Image (cartoon, helix red, strand yellow):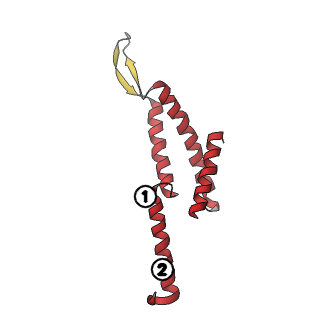
Amino acid sequence: MTNAASLLWDRVCDHLETLKVLSPGDREPLYRYCKMYDRWLRLEQFIDEHGEVYETHAYNRQATGFQIRPQMRVLIQLSEQMSKIESQFGMTPAARTRLRSERQESRSEMDRRMFGDSV
């Protein structure tokens, strides 16, 4: 793993441990997420240096228009995939709210089972 991916790994694991949602089975998805992050960073740097589009030319070298760079397409796909993982692990405000709500519902259900409807 690169340094950037390793630093992210530490940050994300600390965050997920704080939320009490980290389990041993999360290792592979988190590793994939960190690798995606590293690739995303490199693509962001490339796009910053070269732009999101490039000029296309005809055989006579006359400009014919613009095309989105393949790197930009990959960056968009990575962003979408990373957003899904972030949501699953409670790494967005909406996902954290959902996780808190699920925990409260789970606790309430456990209380009802243990103590009946009087709770």
The answer to whether residue 108 is above or below residue 89 is below
Q: Residue 25 at x, y = what percent?
A: 62, 60
Is 3 on the left or on the right of 52, as rendered?
right
Query: Residue 72's x, y, as percent?
Result: 45, 33
Q: Quadrant of the N terminus?
A: top right
Q: Nearer the viewer, residue 70 or 112?
A: 112
The residue depicted at 55 percent of the width and 43 percent of the height is 37
What residue is at 38 percent from the left and 19 percent from the top? 56
In the rendered image of this protein, does residue 118 appear above or below residue 80?
A: below
Q: How many marks can you see? A: 2
The residue that appears at 45% across and 68% down in the rendered structure is 101
Residue lying farthest to the top in this orientation: 60
User: In the image, 20: left or right of 78?
Assistant: right
Query: How far apart in space, not on screen, are marks 2 and 1 (Cα)?
Result: 22 Å
Residue at disc 1, secondary structure: helix
| Residue 9 horizontal side relative to residue 98, left or right | right
Query: Furthest residue to the left?
Result: 64
Q: Residues within 10 Å of mark 2 (few under 14, many from 20)?
A: some
Amino acid type for the residue under numbered disc 1: Ala
Residue 96 seen anywhere in this rendered image of the structure:
yes
Q: Which residue is mark 1?
A: 94
Residue drawn 51% across and 81% down? 110
In terms of image quadrants, where is residue 98?
A: bottom left
Q: Is residue 21 at least partly visible in the picture?
A: no
Q: Horizontal placement of 2 versus 52: left or right?
A: right
- Residue 52's label in the rendered image is none
Q: Give the secondary structure at mark 2.
A: helix
The amino acid pointed to by label 2 is Glu
Q: Can you say whether 73 is above or below 89 in the image?
A: above
Residue, disc 2: 109
Crowding at label 1, few (<14), some or many (≥20) Cα neighbours within 10 Å? Answer: few
Which label's residue is closer to the chain start, 2 or 1? Answer: 1
